[in-house]
Image (cartoon, grey):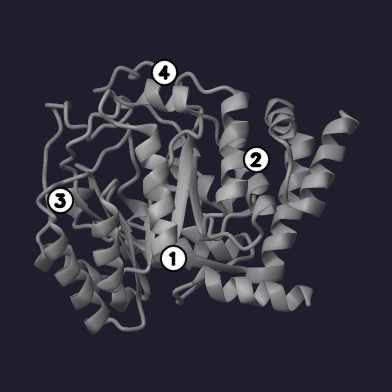
């Protein structure tokens, strides 16, 4: 047993902050014993705020058309083997109708950077969703846009925006993205989203090509300082039509370990057990929840679209990943002592609860 690592872990539990060197030591020093210690404390912290509640988000993958050519992504613009599609506003609304009947109170509109979805179109769509479902939250994950665009979407009623930073290290970011995509712009977009008032989410891949413990430490420090409302991390999984097709997938163990660390950095954060985690491990969702996560995002997309939105190989799109098997998902969560709840699950309300708990 490396007592110095447990000392660092105790510092994190107490202060919710470490130096980059300490984060790096925690990442490099992964062990099952240390992971169990951190997960036990992460679950304790999360239960103090969220009890045993797991929030569900209805994921609607609106388009796999993307102007970008990110080297790791299956729907990158340069992949000529990808079967492209986009949903119409009417089809997206139908997904929301079906999702609402299933109990979803947050809809996540995710897609590639597809110029078809203008500000005007998205604003009209968001306004309609909020009008028909006033008790629901709308989350967007549509990539980099101008600050003016983000403001219009927020003013139309969008509540949250997910934009993975992918790498807090400029050099690593540039290795994973083509010339023309800017680390500085990605970071500026995240800042703009927070400034406008969005509940903002960031995140990164675990085990990405070229990634080291030092890189992950920088990601953790960025998350600590940026203070996102949400954070989505999942293991890197290669896609057959990218230059990283023969790379190994990231580790479910390390991903769960990092979920615990992120929970301890920001106790009130909304933290998904991602589809990628469920793809690399049959019980990945459950393991994520038991490591400190508190969100799952089943798929509300039309069945014809699910298989085409393939960011990586073998992406889950059936079974409990399908929203219409929500009863099975609830049962799986109940089997590990958790309750899937029908609620928006806003982090701001939970933040106030946390302050009250401390006060």
Lower position in the chain sequence, tag 1 or tag 2? 1
What residue is rendered at 41% in x and 47% in y?
275
165, above or below 129, in the image: above
75, above or below 143, in the image: above
CA gap between label 1 and label 2 equals 22 Å
Label 4, residues with CA under 10 Å away: few <14, some 14-19, many ≥20 = some
CA gap between label 3 and label 1 equals 22 Å
Quadrant of res 329: bottom left
SS at mark 3 in the image:
helix
Lower position in the chain sequence, tag 3 or tag 1? 1
Residue on which disc 3 sits? 304
Residue on which disc 4 sits? 247
Depth order, front residue of 153/349: 153
CA gap between label 3 and label 2 equals 35 Å
Residue on which disc 1 sits? 56
Marks 3, 2: nearer the viewer: 2
SS at mark 4 in the image:
loop
Lower position in the chain sequence, tag 3 or tag 2? 2
| Quarter in which the C terminus is drawn | bottom right
């Amino acid at each position: 047993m490396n007592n110095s690592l447990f000392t660092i872990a105790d510092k994190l539990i107490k202060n919710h902050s470490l130096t980059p060197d300490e984060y790096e030591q925690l990442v490099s020093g992964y062990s099952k014993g240390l992971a169990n210690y951190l997960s036990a404390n992460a679950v304790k912290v999360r239960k103090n705020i969220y009890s045993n509640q797991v929030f569900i988000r209805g994921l609607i993958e609106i388009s796999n058309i993307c102007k970008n050519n990110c080297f790791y992504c299956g729907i990158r613009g340069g992949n000529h083997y990808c079967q492209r599609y986009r949903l119409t506003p009417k089809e997206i609304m139908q997904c929301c109708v079906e999702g609402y009947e299933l109990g979803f109170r947050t809809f996540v509109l995710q897609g590639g950077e597809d110029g078809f979805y203008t500000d005007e179109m998205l604003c009209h769509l968001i306004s309609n969703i909020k009008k028909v479902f006033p008790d629901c939250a709308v989350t967007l994950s549509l990539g980099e846009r101008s600050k003016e665009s983000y403001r219009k979407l927020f003013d139309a009623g969008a509540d949250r925006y997910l934009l993975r930073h992918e790498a807090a290290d400029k050099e690593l970011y540039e290795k994973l993205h083509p010339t023309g995509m800017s680390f500085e712009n990605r970071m500026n977009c995240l800042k703009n989203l927070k400034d406008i008032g969005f509940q903002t989410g960031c995140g990164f891949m675990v085990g990405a090509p070229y990634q080291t413990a030092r890189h992950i430490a920088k990601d953790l420090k960025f998350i600590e300082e940026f203070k996102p409302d949400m954070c989505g991390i999942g293991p890197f999984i290669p896609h057959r039509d990218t230059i990283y097709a023969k790379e190994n997938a990231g580790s479910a163990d390390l991903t769960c370990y990092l979920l615990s660390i992120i929970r301890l950095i920001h106790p009130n954060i909304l933290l998904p057990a991602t589809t990628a985690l469920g793809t690399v491990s049959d019980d990945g969702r459950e393991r994520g929840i038991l490591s400190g996560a508190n969100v799952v995002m089943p798929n509300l997309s039309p069945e014809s679209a699910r298989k085409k939105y393939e960011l990586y190989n073998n992406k889950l799109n059936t079974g409990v990943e399908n929203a219409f098997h929500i009863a099975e998902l609830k049962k799986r969560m109940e089997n590990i002592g958790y309750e899937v709840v029908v609620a928006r699950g806003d982090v701001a309300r939970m933040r106030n609860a946390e302050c009250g708990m401390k006060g």
